[in-house]
Image (cartoon, rainbow, N blue to C red):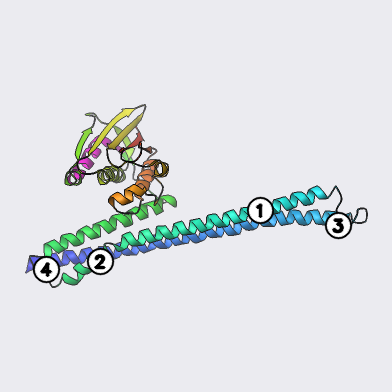
Protein backbone atom coordinates (compact mmCIF):
# COMPACT_ATOMS: atom_id res chain seq x y z
CA UNK A 1 0.00 0.00 0.00
CA UNK A 2 2.85 2.36 0.88
CA UNK A 3 4.51 1.65 -2.48
CA UNK A 4 1.27 2.53 -4.27
CA UNK A 5 1.07 5.83 -2.37
CA UNK A 6 4.66 6.65 -3.36
CA UNK A 7 3.91 5.92 -7.01
CA UNK A 8 0.77 8.06 -6.83
CA UNK A 9 2.80 10.89 -5.32
CA UNK A 10 5.39 10.58 -8.08
CA UNK A 11 2.69 10.70 -10.75
CA UNK A 12 1.16 13.75 -9.10
CA UNK A 13 4.57 15.42 -9.16
CA UNK A 14 4.87 14.71 -12.89
CA UNK A 15 1.46 16.31 -13.49
CA UNK A 16 2.54 19.37 -11.50
CA UNK A 17 5.68 19.64 -13.64
CA UNK A 18 3.51 19.41 -16.74
CA UNK A 19 1.41 22.32 -15.45
CA UNK A 20 4.50 24.45 -14.96
CA UNK A 21 5.83 23.62 -18.43
CA UNK A 22 2.43 24.39 -19.97
CA UNK A 23 2.50 27.86 -18.39
CA UNK A 24 6.00 28.41 -19.79
CA UNK A 25 4.78 27.32 -23.22
CA UNK A 26 1.94 29.83 -23.09
CA UNK A 27 4.46 32.54 -22.25
CA UNK A 28 6.54 31.62 -25.31
CA UNK A 29 3.50 31.62 -27.57
CA UNK A 30 2.49 35.04 -26.25
CA UNK A 31 5.99 36.33 -26.97
CA UNK A 32 5.79 35.03 -30.55
CA UNK A 33 2.48 36.81 -31.04
CA UNK A 34 3.89 40.07 -29.64
CA UNK A 35 6.85 39.79 -32.01
CA UNK A 36 4.47 39.42 -34.94
CA UNK A 37 2.49 42.53 -33.98
CA UNK A 38 5.65 44.57 -33.43
CA UNK A 39 7.02 43.48 -36.82
CA UNK A 40 3.85 44.51 -38.60
CA UNK A 41 3.80 47.86 -36.79
CA UNK A 42 7.40 48.58 -37.76
CA UNK A 43 6.74 47.74 -41.40
CA UNK A 44 3.55 49.78 -41.74
CA UNK A 45 4.34 52.72 -39.46
CA UNK A 46 8.02 53.31 -40.12
CA UNK A 47 8.64 52.24 -43.68
CA UNK A 48 5.46 52.58 -45.73
CA UNK A 49 4.30 55.85 -44.20
CA UNK A 50 7.79 57.37 -44.12
CA UNK A 51 8.41 56.67 -47.81
CA UNK A 52 4.99 57.93 -48.89
CA UNK A 53 5.34 61.10 -46.80
CA UNK A 54 8.78 61.80 -48.20
CA UNK A 55 7.59 61.45 -51.79
CA UNK A 56 4.49 63.56 -51.15
CA UNK A 57 6.61 66.22 -49.47
CA UNK A 58 8.89 66.45 -52.49
CA UNK A 59 5.89 66.67 -54.80
CA UNK A 60 4.33 69.48 -52.76
CA UNK A 61 7.64 71.39 -52.70
CA UNK A 62 7.88 71.14 -56.46
CA UNK A 63 4.30 72.39 -56.92
CA UNK A 64 4.79 75.29 -54.49
CA UNK A 65 7.99 76.21 -56.27
CA UNK A 66 6.14 76.29 -59.56
CA UNK A 67 3.32 78.39 -58.04
CA UNK A 68 5.76 80.93 -56.55
CA UNK A 69 7.00 81.69 -60.05
CA UNK A 70 3.52 81.91 -61.59
CA UNK A 71 3.90 85.63 -62.30
CA UNK A 72 6.97 84.99 -64.41
CA UNK A 73 5.97 81.63 -65.89
CA UNK A 74 3.14 80.15 -67.88
CA UNK A 75 0.23 78.43 -66.12
CA UNK A 76 1.61 75.11 -67.27
CA UNK A 77 4.95 74.46 -65.52
CA UNK A 78 7.83 75.37 -67.75
CA UNK A 79 11.08 73.51 -68.42
CA UNK A 80 12.58 74.53 -65.05
CA UNK A 81 9.74 72.95 -63.05
CA UNK A 82 9.03 69.96 -65.26
CA UNK A 83 12.06 67.92 -64.13
CA UNK A 84 11.19 68.53 -60.47
CA UNK A 85 7.59 67.44 -60.95
CA UNK A 86 8.69 64.46 -63.04
CA UNK A 87 11.20 63.37 -60.40
CA UNK A 88 8.68 63.80 -57.57
CA UNK A 89 6.08 61.80 -59.46
CA UNK A 90 8.61 59.07 -60.16
CA UNK A 91 9.54 58.87 -56.48
CA UNK A 92 5.86 58.80 -55.50
CA UNK A 93 5.29 55.92 -57.91
CA UNK A 94 8.34 54.08 -56.58
CA UNK A 95 7.15 54.61 -53.00
CA UNK A 96 3.69 53.30 -53.88
CA UNK A 97 5.19 50.20 -55.49
CA UNK A 98 7.49 49.76 -52.50
CA UNK A 99 4.51 50.03 -50.19
CA UNK A 100 2.80 47.25 -52.14
CA UNK A 101 5.92 45.08 -51.86
CA UNK A 102 6.15 45.75 -48.13
CA UNK A 103 2.51 44.84 -47.72
CA UNK A 104 3.21 41.56 -49.51
CA UNK A 105 6.16 40.91 -47.22
CA UNK A 106 4.05 41.68 -44.17
CA UNK A 107 1.32 39.30 -45.36
CA UNK A 108 3.88 36.54 -45.97
CA UNK A 109 5.41 37.18 -42.54
CA UNK A 110 1.96 36.96 -40.98
CA UNK A 111 1.28 33.67 -42.76
CA UNK A 112 4.66 32.31 -41.61
CA UNK A 113 4.02 33.37 -38.02
CA UNK A 114 0.60 31.71 -38.09
CA UNK A 115 2.20 28.56 -39.46
CA UNK A 116 4.81 28.63 -36.69
CA UNK A 117 2.17 29.12 -33.99
CA UNK A 118 0.15 26.24 -35.46
CA UNK A 119 3.23 23.97 -35.39
CA UNK A 120 4.05 24.94 -31.82
CA UNK A 121 0.47 24.44 -30.67
CA UNK A 122 0.28 21.07 -32.45
CA UNK A 123 3.53 19.77 -30.98
CA UNK A 124 2.64 20.92 -27.47
CA UNK A 125 -0.86 19.48 -27.76
CA UNK A 126 0.29 16.04 -28.95
CA UNK A 127 1.43 14.80 -25.51
CA UNK A 128 -1.71 16.11 -23.81
CA UNK A 129 -3.99 13.34 -25.12
CA UNK A 130 -2.08 10.43 -23.52
CA UNK A 131 -1.43 12.55 -20.42
CA UNK A 132 -5.16 13.24 -20.05
CA UNK A 133 -5.99 9.55 -20.46
CA UNK A 134 -3.36 8.53 -17.93
CA UNK A 135 -4.49 11.21 -15.46
CA UNK A 136 -8.05 9.91 -15.70
CA UNK A 137 -7.02 6.30 -15.02
CA UNK A 138 -4.17 6.68 -12.58
CA UNK A 139 -6.37 6.76 -9.49
CA UNK A 140 -8.29 3.64 -10.56
CA UNK A 141 -5.61 1.25 -11.79
CA UNK A 142 -4.13 -1.64 -9.91
CA UNK A 143 -0.73 -1.44 -8.29
CA UNK A 144 0.71 -3.74 -10.99
CA UNK A 145 -0.36 -1.44 -13.84
CA UNK A 146 0.63 1.81 -12.13
CA UNK A 147 4.40 1.62 -12.92
CA UNK A 148 3.68 1.27 -16.64
CA UNK A 149 1.34 4.28 -16.65
CA UNK A 150 3.82 6.25 -14.60
CA UNK A 151 6.58 5.51 -17.13
CA UNK A 152 4.31 6.63 -19.98
CA UNK A 153 3.44 9.81 -18.09
CA UNK A 154 7.09 10.58 -17.39
CA UNK A 155 7.95 10.07 -21.07
CA UNK A 156 5.26 12.46 -22.30
CA UNK A 157 6.10 15.09 -19.68
CA UNK A 158 9.80 14.79 -20.54
CA UNK A 159 9.04 15.25 -24.25
CA UNK A 160 6.91 18.30 -23.57
CA UNK A 161 9.54 19.72 -21.22
CA UNK A 162 12.19 19.42 -23.96
CA UNK A 163 9.98 21.26 -26.45
CA UNK A 164 9.32 24.08 -24.01
CA UNK A 165 12.99 24.30 -23.01
CA UNK A 166 14.03 24.58 -26.68
CA UNK A 167 11.42 27.30 -27.25
CA UNK A 168 12.65 29.19 -24.21
CA UNK A 169 16.26 28.88 -25.36
CA UNK A 170 15.40 30.31 -28.79
CA UNK A 171 13.45 33.11 -27.13
CA UNK A 172 16.34 33.91 -24.79
CA UNK A 173 18.82 33.91 -27.66
CA UNK A 174 16.77 36.28 -29.83
CA UNK A 175 16.26 38.69 -26.92
CA UNK A 176 19.87 38.57 -25.74
CA UNK A 177 18.99 36.86 -22.46
CA UNK A 178 20.91 33.63 -23.02
CA UNK A 179 23.40 33.25 -20.18
CA UNK A 180 26.27 30.78 -19.87
CA UNK A 181 28.23 29.63 -16.83
CA UNK A 182 31.67 29.47 -18.42
CA UNK A 183 34.62 27.75 -16.81
CA UNK A 184 37.78 25.97 -18.00
CA UNK A 185 37.02 22.33 -18.81
CA UNK A 186 38.25 19.33 -20.75
CA UNK A 187 35.73 18.65 -23.52
CA UNK A 188 36.93 15.08 -24.21
CA UNK A 189 35.31 13.39 -21.17
CA UNK A 190 32.21 15.56 -21.67
CA UNK A 191 31.74 14.17 -25.19
CA UNK A 192 32.40 10.61 -23.95
CA UNK A 193 29.65 11.02 -21.35
CA UNK A 194 27.21 12.31 -23.96
CA UNK A 195 28.02 9.39 -26.27
CA UNK A 196 27.31 6.92 -23.45
CA UNK A 197 23.96 8.58 -22.76
CA UNK A 198 22.99 8.50 -26.47
CA UNK A 199 23.96 4.87 -27.11
CA UNK A 200 20.57 3.43 -26.06
CA UNK A 201 18.82 5.57 -28.72
CA UNK A 202 21.40 4.59 -31.34
CA UNK A 203 21.12 0.89 -30.46
CA UNK A 204 17.32 1.08 -30.46
CA UNK A 205 17.43 2.31 -34.05
CA UNK A 206 19.95 -0.44 -34.93
CA UNK A 207 22.62 2.00 -36.10
CA UNK A 208 26.36 1.38 -36.26
CA UNK A 209 28.22 3.96 -34.20
CA UNK A 210 31.93 4.77 -34.09
CA UNK A 211 33.88 7.50 -32.34
CA UNK A 212 37.41 8.78 -32.63
CA UNK A 213 38.34 10.85 -29.56
CA UNK A 214 41.82 11.97 -28.53
CA UNK A 215 43.46 10.42 -25.48
CA UNK A 216 44.76 13.79 -24.29
CA UNK A 217 42.86 16.78 -22.84
CA UNK A 218 41.35 19.49 -25.04
CA UNK A 219 40.67 22.41 -22.74
CA UNK A 220 38.15 25.10 -23.60
CA UNK A 221 36.17 27.74 -21.76
CA UNK A 222 32.66 26.34 -21.70
CA UNK A 223 29.36 25.70 -19.98
CA UNK A 224 29.14 21.97 -19.21
CA UNK A 225 25.34 21.80 -19.31
CA UNK A 226 25.02 23.76 -22.55
CA UNK A 227 27.81 21.91 -24.37
CA UNK A 228 26.21 18.63 -23.33
CA UNK A 229 22.99 19.93 -24.86
CA UNK A 230 24.78 20.81 -28.12
CA UNK A 231 26.44 17.41 -28.60
CA UNK A 232 23.30 15.53 -27.53
CA UNK A 233 21.13 17.45 -29.99
CA UNK A 234 23.42 16.74 -32.94
CA UNK A 235 23.87 13.04 -32.15
CA UNK A 236 20.17 12.40 -31.57
CA UNK A 237 19.37 14.40 -34.71
CA UNK A 238 21.72 12.17 -36.71
CA UNK A 239 20.10 9.06 -35.22
CA UNK A 240 16.61 10.41 -35.87
CA UNK A 241 17.20 10.94 -39.59
CA UNK A 242 19.26 7.85 -40.36
CA UNK A 243 17.34 4.73 -41.43
CA UNK A 244 17.78 1.49 -39.49
CA UNK A 245 21.03 -0.21 -40.36
CA UNK A 246 22.75 3.09 -41.10
CA UNK A 247 25.85 4.52 -39.46
CA UNK A 248 26.82 7.55 -37.35
CA UNK A 249 30.45 8.59 -36.90
CA UNK A 250 31.88 11.05 -34.36
CA UNK A 251 35.38 12.46 -34.36
CA UNK A 252 37.18 15.25 -32.55
CA UNK A 253 40.62 16.81 -32.79
CA UNK A 254 42.48 20.10 -32.30
CA UNK A 255 43.47 22.21 -35.30
CA UNK A 256 44.76 25.79 -35.58
CA UNK A 257 43.75 26.78 -32.06
CA UNK A 258 40.25 25.30 -32.14
CA UNK A 259 38.53 22.05 -31.24
CA UNK A 260 36.78 20.48 -34.24
CA UNK A 261 33.92 18.11 -33.43
CA UNK A 262 32.42 16.30 -36.43
CA UNK A 263 29.28 14.14 -36.39
CA UNK A 264 28.48 12.46 -39.72
CA UNK A 265 25.75 10.05 -40.81
CA UNK A 266 24.66 8.28 -43.99
CA UNK A 267 21.00 9.14 -43.49
CA UNK A 268 18.42 11.03 -45.54
CA UNK A 269 20.66 14.06 -46.07
CA UNK A 270 19.61 17.68 -46.56
CA UNK A 271 18.24 19.22 -49.74
CA UNK A 272 20.15 22.19 -51.24
CA UNK A 273 17.13 24.42 -50.62
CA UNK A 274 17.06 23.66 -46.90
CA UNK A 275 20.83 23.53 -46.34
CA UNK A 276 21.32 27.31 -46.37
CA UNK A 277 18.57 27.80 -43.77
CA UNK A 278 18.90 24.64 -41.69
CA UNK A 279 19.88 26.55 -38.53
CA UNK A 280 17.04 29.06 -38.78
CA UNK A 281 14.14 28.62 -36.32
CA UNK A 282 11.16 26.53 -37.48
CA UNK A 283 12.87 25.55 -40.74
CA UNK A 284 12.45 21.90 -41.72
CA UNK A 285 13.42 20.01 -44.83
CA UNK A 286 10.38 18.52 -46.56
CA UNK A 287 11.91 15.07 -46.72
CA UNK A 288 12.75 15.23 -43.00
CA UNK A 289 9.11 15.90 -42.15
CA UNK A 290 8.03 13.00 -44.31
CA UNK A 291 10.66 10.69 -42.83
CA UNK A 292 10.21 11.25 -39.12
CA UNK A 293 7.23 13.45 -38.33
CA UNK A 294 6.93 17.22 -38.03
CA UNK A 295 8.62 18.54 -34.90
CA UNK A 296 9.35 22.19 -34.25
CA UNK A 297 12.51 22.61 -36.27
CA UNK A 298 14.34 24.52 -33.52
CA UNK A 299 16.82 21.93 -32.21
CA UNK A 300 19.55 23.04 -34.62
CA UNK A 301 18.74 26.69 -33.93
CA UNK A 302 19.48 26.06 -30.27
CA UNK A 303 22.74 24.35 -31.27
CA UNK A 304 23.85 27.35 -33.34
CA UNK A 305 22.98 29.89 -30.64
CA UNK A 306 24.78 27.93 -27.91
CA UNK A 307 27.88 27.30 -30.03
CA UNK A 308 28.13 30.95 -31.08
CA UNK A 309 27.64 32.02 -27.45
CA UNK A 310 30.84 30.02 -26.74
CA UNK A 311 32.68 31.96 -29.44
CA UNK A 312 32.50 29.04 -31.85
CA UNK A 313 30.72 28.15 -35.07
CA UNK A 314 28.71 25.26 -36.51
CA UNK A 315 28.22 24.31 -40.16
CA UNK A 316 26.10 21.68 -41.90
CA UNK A 317 27.29 19.78 -44.99
CA UNK A 318 25.32 17.49 -47.28
CA UNK A 319 25.48 16.42 -50.93
CA UNK A 320 21.69 16.29 -51.07
CA UNK A 321 18.82 13.88 -50.39
CA UNK A 322 19.87 10.39 -49.27
CA UNK A 323 23.54 11.43 -49.23
CA UNK A 324 23.91 11.77 -45.48
CA UNK A 325 24.92 14.88 -43.57
CA UNK A 326 27.81 16.16 -41.47
CA UNK A 327 27.74 18.75 -38.70
CA UNK A 328 31.03 20.36 -37.68
CA UNK A 329 31.33 22.35 -34.45
CA UNK A 330 34.42 24.46 -33.80
CA UNK A 331 35.22 25.89 -30.38
CA UNK A 332 38.27 27.98 -29.38
CA UNK A 333 40.93 26.20 -27.35
CA UNK A 334 42.26 27.79 -24.20
CA UNK A 335 45.69 29.29 -24.81
Residue that numbered label 2 is attached to: 129
**Label 4, residues with CA under 10 Å away: few <14, some 14-19, many ≥20:** few
Residue that numbered label 3 is attached to: 67
Tell me which label, 3 or 2, sits earlier in the chain: 3
Classify 44 as above or below 244.
Answer: below
Q: Which residues, given as a range, are shown in magenta?
A: 184-200
Tell me which label, 1 or 4, sits earlier in the chain: 4
Magenta highlight on residue 104: no
Residue that numbered label 1 is attached to: 95
Which label sits in the foreground, 2 or 4? Answer: 2
Indicate the quadrant containing the C terminus: top left, top right, bottom left or bottom right: top left
Calculate the distance from the C-alpha at mark 2 to the C-alpha at mark 4: 24 Å
Magenta span main SS = helix
Classify 128 as above or below 327.
Answer: below
**Label 3, residues with CA under 10 Å away: few <14, some 14-19, many ≥20:** some
Calculate the distance from the C-alpha at mark 3 to the C-alpha at mark 2: 73 Å
**Residue found 29% across the figure and 53% down from its top:** 293
**Residue found 62% across the figure and 53% down from its top:** 98
- Residue 89, percent from left and from top: 74, 53
Residue that numbered label 4 is attached to: 5
Calculate the distance from the C-alpha at mark 1 to the C-alpha at mark 4: 71 Å
Calculate the distance from the C-alpha at mark 1 to the C-alpha at mark 2: 51 Å
Tell me which label, 3 or 4, sits earlier in the chain: 4
Calculate the distance from the C-alpha at mark 3 to the C-alpha at mark 4: 91 Å
Amino acid sequence: MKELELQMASATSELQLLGEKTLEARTVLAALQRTLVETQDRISDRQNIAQLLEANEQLVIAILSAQSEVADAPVIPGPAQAPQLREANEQLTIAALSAQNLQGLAERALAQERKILAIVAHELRNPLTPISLIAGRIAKVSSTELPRLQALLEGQVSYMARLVDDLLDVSRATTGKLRLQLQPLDIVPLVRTVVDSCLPVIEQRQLAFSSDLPDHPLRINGDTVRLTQVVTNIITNAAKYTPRGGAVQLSMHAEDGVVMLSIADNGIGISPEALSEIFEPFVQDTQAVGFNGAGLGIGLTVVRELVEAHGGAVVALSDGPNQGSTFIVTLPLLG
